[in-house]
Amino acid sequence: MINHKIKFSGIAIAFFSFTIMGFAQNGTVNIDQDSDIDKLLEYKKDVKTVNLFKIQVYSGTRSGAETSKQNFLNSFNEWPVSMEFDSPNTKIWVGNFRSRLEADKALLKIKKKYNNAFIFEPKKDKK
């Protein structure tokens, strides 16, 4: 009697499984997203893997850095400028150059007004 219940249960489970699989739906999922998202993801991936170069044009007091930053922006507007505090000095950094050659070309222009400017690679944050 127990043997018949086990056989019946096994047959019922098998039949039920095949029935469910027979009603399963197959389909495709289409994701509709803005193409700019892909561009942004590629850019982010590139930024993490590429070594960026910057040019330092000033290092000193905060008030001197603010003046230097404004003077730089009045003379050059083609590169981003940031003011960075590195105790005890405040520094003015220019650009996010993707290659040393690109930074060298910019340095030639910048050196005409900031003769102490130099190229460097910022330290990478450990994240």
Image (cartoon, rainbow, N blue to C red):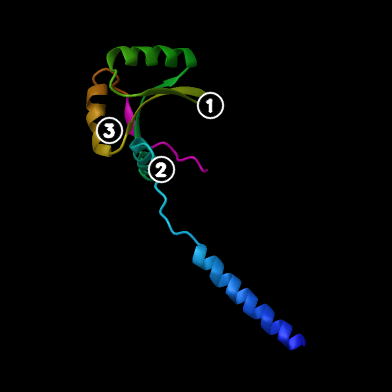
Q: CA distance from mark 2 to mark 3?
A: 18 Å
Categorize mark 1 by other alpha carbons within 10 Å: few (<14), some (14-19), many (20+): few
Q: In terms of sequence position, does the residue under pointer 2 or pointer 3 come before the other?
A: 2
Vertical side of 9 occupied by 69: above or below: above
Q: Are marks 1 and 2 in contact (CB under 8 Å)?
A: no
Categorize mark 3 by other alpha carbons within 10 Å: few (<14), some (14-19), many (20+): many
In this picture, which residue range is highlighted in magenta? 117-127
Q: Label 2's element?
A: helix
Q: Main secondary structure of the magenta part?
A: loop
Q: Disc 3 marks which amino acid?
A: Ala
Could you say which is closer to the camera, residue 117 or residue 85? 85
Q: Position of residue 41 (x, y in %)?
A: 39, 41
For label 1, the residue is 87
Q: Disc 1 marks which amino acid?
A: Ser
Q: Position of residue 113 (x, y in %)?
A: 27, 17
For label 2, the residue is 48
Q: Residue at x 38, y 16 (%)?
A: 69
For label 3, the residue is 103
Q: Residue at x 58, y 71 (%)?
A: 17
